[in-house]
Each structure stands twice: as C-alpha cells, then as structure tokens.
C-alpha cells in the first residue's frame, strides 16, 4: 500500500467536497455554470474557472478514476519531489490542459463546450510518472498482462489525440493532451537542470 502524502490527501479531500456539494448539496447545474471551464466568450465564463474546473467532476466513476490515478501515480512523485514542487507541477499541468482545451475550441469553433475534472492535471502526472519510472509494471483491469509505463502512457495519450480529432463523445480529449504536453515540457526542463526538492 502506497503511503498517502499530504498534498495528494488534501487534493482528494477538496475534490470530494466539490463532488458532494455538486450532486448532493447544491443545484448541480448552478455549480457547473459557476465552476466548470467555459470558453472565454461564453456568458458562463468566469476567470476562476481555469482553476475550479480541476475540482469538478461529471459523475462518480469520473472522480473515482481520477482520484485513484492521483493516488497511484502521484504519490511516488510527491514523495520524491516534495509537496511544493508536486503542487506546482499539478496546477501547471491543469492550467495547460485548460489552455489547450480552449485553443482547440477556438480552432474548431466549438464555443459551447465545457470541461470538468482533474484529468488534465492527472495526464501531466502520468507523463511525469512514465518519464521517472519508465519500467514500472502497470496491472490494468482491462488488460490481462502487466505493461510498462513507458509503453502504456504514450499509447493512452495517442488514443486521446485520435479521439480528440474524430470526436463523437463528451470527453475533453484536448484537455488531456494539454495536461500531458505541459507535463512533458516541465519534465524536460527539470531533467536539463539539476534536480532539487523545493522544500529543503
């Protein structure tokens, strides 16, 4: 069992609070209109949505998978980096996801789309995990044989890229791509500079 580091624990708590408030306390549509990420020209857009959309989720399975991935892939990174560096990376990937999602909607003229979820930040975490622990074996529910992170994570990102262009579902694939891209850029920068924890 992986120990739950403090930053990840608090992120999970905040996500659960938002989820409970959305579906069991307040009117669901009202909170989505306030905290989901909308296109800047939308009447529902507010500047804080670039952050708050990371804590909103569309359903139980959505938050379950995201929080499990945050725990499973993020915990080793927080333990290695320290809390401050992990939190910077997490929010940077999430903001990158928001930027690429918005840019994709601009090019496709899809001005009514909205995005919720920590998935963009999680994809950044996945990239960081794959670059840091490339030979780690991942046991997946839908795949009977353990697969190395260095193979699974690129395939996952490429599948998002494919479905992002083909469309047909309500998943913000380009938000995933954005989180992965920004995570990759940050990791490249950190690898080219001497690694150090920010809390020492």
Image (cartoon, rainbow, N blue to C red):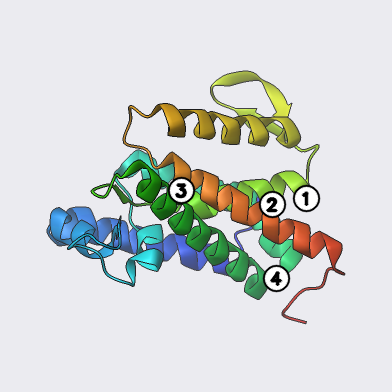
Q: Are marks 3 and 2 in contact (CB under 8 Å)?
A: no
Residue 82 visible to the viewer: yes
In the foreground, 87 or 5: 87
Q: Which mark is residue 176?
A: none
First of labels 4, 2 by sequence position: 4
Q: Which residue is depicted at the point 67% across and 71% down?
A: 85
Q: Which residue is mark 3?
A: 175
* Residue 75 location (% of width, % of height): 64, 56
Q: Which residue is mark 4?
A: 82
Residue 1 visible to the viewer: no
Q: Residues within 10 Å of mark 2 (few under 14, many from 20)?
A: many
In the foreground, 4 or 124: 124
Q: Which residue is depicted at the point 59% across and 48% down?
A: 180
Distance of mark 3 from mark 2, alpha carbons? 16 Å
Q: Are marks 4 and 3 in contact (CB under 8 Å)?
A: no
Q: Is residue 150 above or below residue 18?
A: above
* Residue 23 location (% of width, % of height): 20, 53
* Residue 38 location (% of width, % of height): 28, 57
Q: Which residue is mark 1?
A: 132
First of labels 1, 3 by sequence position: 1
Query: What secondary structure is marked by label 1?
Result: helix
Q: Which image quarter holds the C terminus?
A: bottom right
First of labels 3, 2 by sequence position: 2
Q: Are marks 1 and 2 in contact (CB under 8 Å)?
A: yes
Q: Which residue is mark 2?
A: 128
Q: Are marks 4 and 2 in contact (CB under 8 Å)?
A: no
Mark 4 or mark 3, which is nearer to you? 3
């Amino acid at each position: 069992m992986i120990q739950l580091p403090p930053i990840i624990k608090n992120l999970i708590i905040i996500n659960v609070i938002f989820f409970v408030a959305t579906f069991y306390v307040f009117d669901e549509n009202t909170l989505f209109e306030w905290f989901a990420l909308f296109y800047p020209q939308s009447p529902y857009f507010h500047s804080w949505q670039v952050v708050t959309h990371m804590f909103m989720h569309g359903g139980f399975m959505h938050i379950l998978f995201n929080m499990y991935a945050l725990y499973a892939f993020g915990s080793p990174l927080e333990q290695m980096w320290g809390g401050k560096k992990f939190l910077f990376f997490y929010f940077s990937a999430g903001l990158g996801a928001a930027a690429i999602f918005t840019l994709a909607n601009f090019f496709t003229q899809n001005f009514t789309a909205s995005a919720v979820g920590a998935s963009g930040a999680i994809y950044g975490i996945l990239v960081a995990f794959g670059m840091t622990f490339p030979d780690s074996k991942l046991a997946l529910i839908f795949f009977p044989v353990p697969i190395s992170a260095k193979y699974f994570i690129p395939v996952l990102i490429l599948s998002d890229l494919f479905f992002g262009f083909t469309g047909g579902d309500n998943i913000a694939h380009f938000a995933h791509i954005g989180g992965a891209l920004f995570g990759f850029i940050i990791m490249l920068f950190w690898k080219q500079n001497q690694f150090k924890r920010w809390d020492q």
